[in-house]
Image (cartoon, rainbow, N blue to C red):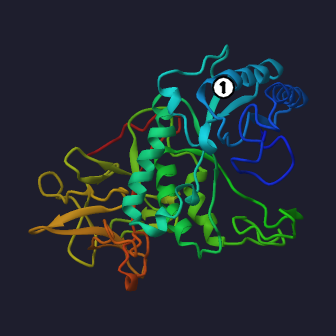
Amino acid sequence: MVILDNHLSTPGWCCSSSDGNGFFGDQYFDPNLWIKGLTKMATLFKGNPYVVGMSLRNELRGPKQNSADWYRYMQGGAEAVHRANPNVLVILSGLNYDKDFTFLRNKPVSLTFTGKLVFEMHWYGFSDGDAWKDGNPNEVCGTVVNNNMRMSGFLLDQGYPLFVSEFGIDLRGTNVNDNRYFNCFLAWAAEYDLDWALWTLVGSYYLREGVVGLNEYYGLLNWNWYELRNASFLQRISVIQSPLQGLKTRPHKIIFHPLTGLCIVRKSHLDPLKLGNCSESDHWYYTPQKILTMKGTYFCLQAEGLDLPVQTSVICPGFGTTWDLISDSKLHIAATLGYNNTVCLDVDSDNHIITTNCKCLSGDNTCDPASQDKRDAGISALRFVRELELGEDGEIDEDVIV
């Protein structure tokens, strides 16, 4: 499927606040000509089942940006696309490089059509400068996610689809800022079951900014466009490639490990809990008493002690281990054993789920909570993800034993 994206009015590399393409009325951004272009493209692909959406403008930005002109022209562009092609999704970007929709809190868009409006946002590690590298990853994750929800994510609560139309990382794996950001991004995208588009597929460019054959280190493909640049990346994003939430109620949870893209699984009651494919994950309920119980069983998750494998037990109500999300990132699932002895779910060298000392919670900017390398005093962080299971008839499975 294809989404048409109006990126620039003049050919070139995007984007800067002074490139003349940033906002309505800029040197190269004539709103009337822009609407004519949207109309032409919507008409050209009308009836094509593979063109499913039109993104009206990429990364509005620059000194001229303001909400009054945003409403005037974005609503006008949306109506023009709808008149030309009533079957295509209409995708609206916000201000400040597709990050800011706060002006919609008090004044929603006013359009003649409903049911096909989508809002888009962008989020990269560099969107937050060097905060991920210079700060404690848990604290930065909590701060940035809260800010994203304040600026864009609130649209989900208003019932609108929110499309992360750009995200990506340096796939060489050497960029600390990107690596730390991506653990947080994956947990957030999985929790809210967001739709997304990855920057980028391409491995290199014929010509970019005057350089012939420039390597694209954010590219999924290698320079030759023939090999994967980083095979493990596909595993990491696999969990967000499938729907995690449905249209019904009564959700259960999976427990997701962003660093690997895997989830907690168990082959049988006699087997240890391990990381495995999220499609085979056990389904968990998190009770008001903060006990983790397995769907369809009497078993609950029990912490046995420091550096020991976790177990499943039938001794749950009143005796089961209570689990809390204790860090700003919500990536530490912790239990208290004895007097103030707090341990967190972790993964050992054999891929078994254990409990270890909780580390990297705050302050230290050298400690990465998603690292599995114990020499770096890292703790591999896990995250609850809400998921709905549908029965064969498309209805929620009501067989719940807690």
Does residue 154 appear left or right of residue 284 in this picture?
right
Q: Which of 202 and 293 is in front in this view?
A: 202
Residue 255 visible here: no
Does residue 321 appear left or right of residue 36 in this picture?
left
Query: Most extreme residue toward the top, as rendered?
Result: 112
Residue placed at 76% from the left, 24% from the top?
87
Where is residue 196 shown, x and y percent of the image?
Answer: 63, 47
Where is residue 255 shown, x and y percent of the image?
Answer: 40, 58
Amino acid type shown at disc 1? Asp
Quarter of the picture holding the N terminus: top right
State whether residue 127 is above or below residue 305.
above
Determine which quarter of the picture holds residue 198: bottom right
Where is residue 130 shown, x and y percent of the image?
Answer: 51, 64
Query: Most extreme residue toward the left, as rendered?
Result: 339
Q: Nearer the viewer, residue 135 or 204?
A: 135
State whether residue 332 is above or below residue 352.
above
Where is residue 359 shown, x and y percent of the image?
Answer: 30, 72
Residue 138 visible here: yes
Q: Is mark 1 on a helix, strand or loop?
A: helix
Q: Which class describes the residues within 10 Å of circle 1: few (<14), some (14-19), or many (20+)? A: some
- What residue does disc 1 label? 69
Does residue 296 appear left or right of residue 149 in this picture?
left
Determine which quarter of the picture holds residue 358: bottom left
State whether residue 314 is above or below residue 119.
below
